[in-house]
Image (cartoon, helix red, strand yellow):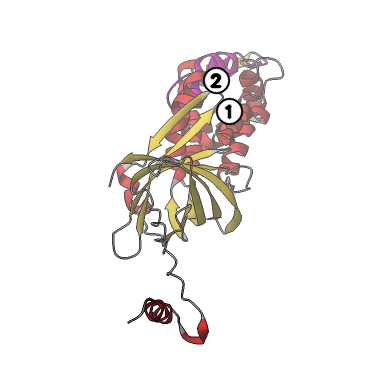
Amino acid sequence: MSRRASLLLITACASSGHGRVSSPPAPTTAPAPAVRWSTGTFDVRTELDVATSGLAGARLSASLLTLAELDAHPGHALLSLAAIQGLPAVAKLRKVPRLGAKLEAYLDDAVAREAPAGSARFAALGEDLRALTRVIELGSTLAVTAPAAGAPTATHALAALSFTRADRRIEVPVPAALVDAVRPTAPALATDGAALTLGAHAFAVPYGAMLLTAAGPLVFEPLGGPTLRDALAAQVGCPRVAARLGANCELGVCVRDAVPEATLAAVCDQAVAALAAQVEAQIVAQRFDVLALEAGRAELAGADPAAALRGTWTVRVEAEGEVATGSAPFTAARVTAP
């Protein structure tokens, strides 16, 4: 074959249909690997504003009114509670001629004289309790798994509540007796590589008992003792009140002539104890019947998949027949690897 024929054959073999010369296939780019969400167990902290939401609770509001009555009408408050206790000394005092009808006024004066001028100490104590509900921090654990095959899963469990007053913060673990009320829940979970989204889930939160535990060191101890009874007793000052009450006289007949001061002090102490028990019961009854956390979306705080998460819940709270909604920020720090 001639050189010219060989060149023509090579040219023909390199030609494609329609007279075009084919191009080599473009190189293919492998898809970027999907970002695997950080797995493991996270310590989650959610800030929940209870008081501002209007869900401090009717019972807590009733407690505040009960305490405020000690400022306005301590005689009526204490004598009513003492009478409910069935204390015979109260009935005897009310029957003292000319003195019995003035007993409440005498007691009002005796209690008031133990307080600084213009003091509203018991109402202030109640407001300190309300202040503990302004921002409650929910401490919970979130366990996230992301299997190689299948959808990621999450389990969310309430672990503690934290209360703050001024610069002091107390974390109260969920009491063993209340664990059944705060069982873990498993929200639906989705990840897109940039964010993690938790579906709707809910807890029942018996926060009143935990609030009372926190109130011991934060509110009661600065006033006189670790319990509400101790704080009220220190503020009322029953021995001093009994001495002032016993010194009230009419036409030569004094209260202490009918009932000794030691008995008056005991009646006062028992009334204070009854008041404390009543208020404590109202506080312990506080609960969130439903604390629903919805549409929780968290993003990594940094580029590292093991970094902390930051996000926001859509929150719905149901308590005592009332419902409030809003949003609550949260952070989640990884504490254990998968």
Compare residues 245 and 56 and report the one nearer the observer: 56
Answer above or below: position of 135 versus 7.
above
Q: Secondary structure at mark 2?
A: helix
Q: Pointer 1: residues within 10 angstroms few (<14), some, or many (20+)?
A: many
Residue at the disc numbered 1? 125
The residue stretch that appears in magenta: 223-251
Task: Give the number of marks.
Answer: 2
Return the disc, 2 or 1, that comes first in the chain's sequence.
1
Answer with the quarter of the image where residue 44 lies. top left
Q: Is residue 100 visible?
A: no
Does the residue at mark 2 contact the one at mark 1 (Cβ under 8 Å)? yes
Compare residues 293 and 118 and report the one nearer the observer: 293
Point out the residue furthest to the front here. 2
Answer above or below: position of 211 versus 13.
above
Asked if residue 248 is among those painted magenta in the image, a careful observer would answer: yes
| Kind of residue at disc 1 | Leu
